[in-house]
Image (cartoon, helix red, strand yellow):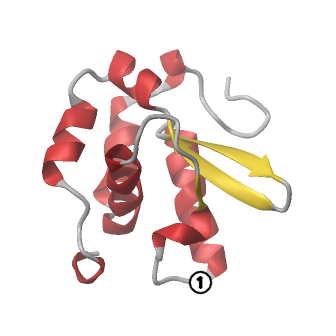
């Protein structure tokens, strides 16, 4: 069962859900950007420059969180996102390397 913030446990992470979350170009761009960052880096959700409204951005981050790809943490009045690198690598070995190899798409590719 997901925690109170909606983060599934490692065992609850489902490949189809993860792949569905990554199928969206904007969500893939967020995850690829986090993969390119050093481990445990947290980024403000607006720092990704997604060309969508706040409510749509919130939706995209909810999908990523519920898939288990990111952990969202409140820091004061900001919400930060961090890649769940260890959980992803343990559950789906090699997925992070594939995302890293694909690179961060340019905004017009999204």
View extreme (front): residue: 38
Residue ID for mark 1: 53
View extreme (left): residue: 101
Residue shown at 24%/74% (left/top)? 106
| Residue 5 drawn above or below residue 106 | above
Q: Is residue 83 left or right of residue 56?
A: left
Quadrant in the picture for the C terminus: bottom left
Residue shown at 52%/43% (left/top)? 41
- The x, y position of residue 4, in whole percent, is 79, 34
Residue shown at 15%/52% (left/top)? 102
Q: Nearer the viewer, residue 78 or 92?
A: 78
Q: How many marks?
A: 1
Q: Is residue 98 left or right of residue 17?
A: left
| Residue 95 drawn above or below residue 105 | above
- The x, y position of residue 61, in whole percent, is 56, 57
Residue shown at 47%/68% (left/top)? 48
Few, some or many C-alpha atoms within 10 Å of disc 1 (few <14, some 14-19, many ≥20)?
few
Q: Is residue 108 left or right of residue 45?
A: left
Q: Nearer the viewer, residue 18 or 86?
A: 86
Q: Nearer the viewer, residue 45 or 12?
A: 45
- The x, y position of residue 20, in whole percent, is 35, 49
**Residue 46: quarter of image:** bottom right
Q: Secondary structure at mark 1?
A: loop
Quadrant in the picture for the N terminus: top right
- The x, y position of residue 108, in whole percent, is 25, 83
| Residue 1 drawn above or below residue 58 | above
């Amino acid at each position: 069962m997901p925690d109170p913030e909606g983060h599934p446990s490692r065992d609850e992470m489902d490949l189809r859900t993860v792949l569905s979350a990554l199928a969206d170009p904007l969500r893939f761009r967020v995850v690829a950007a986090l993969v390119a960052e050093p481990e445990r880096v947290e980024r403000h959700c607006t720092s990704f420059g997604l060309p969508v409204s706040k409510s749509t951005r919130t939706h995209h981050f909810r999908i990523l969180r519920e898939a288990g790809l990111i952990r969202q943490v409140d820091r004061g009045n900001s919400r930060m996102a961090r890649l769940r690198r260890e959980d992803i690598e343990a559950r789906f070995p090699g997925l992070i390397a594939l995302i890293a190899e694909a690179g961060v798409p340019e905004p017009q590719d999204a």
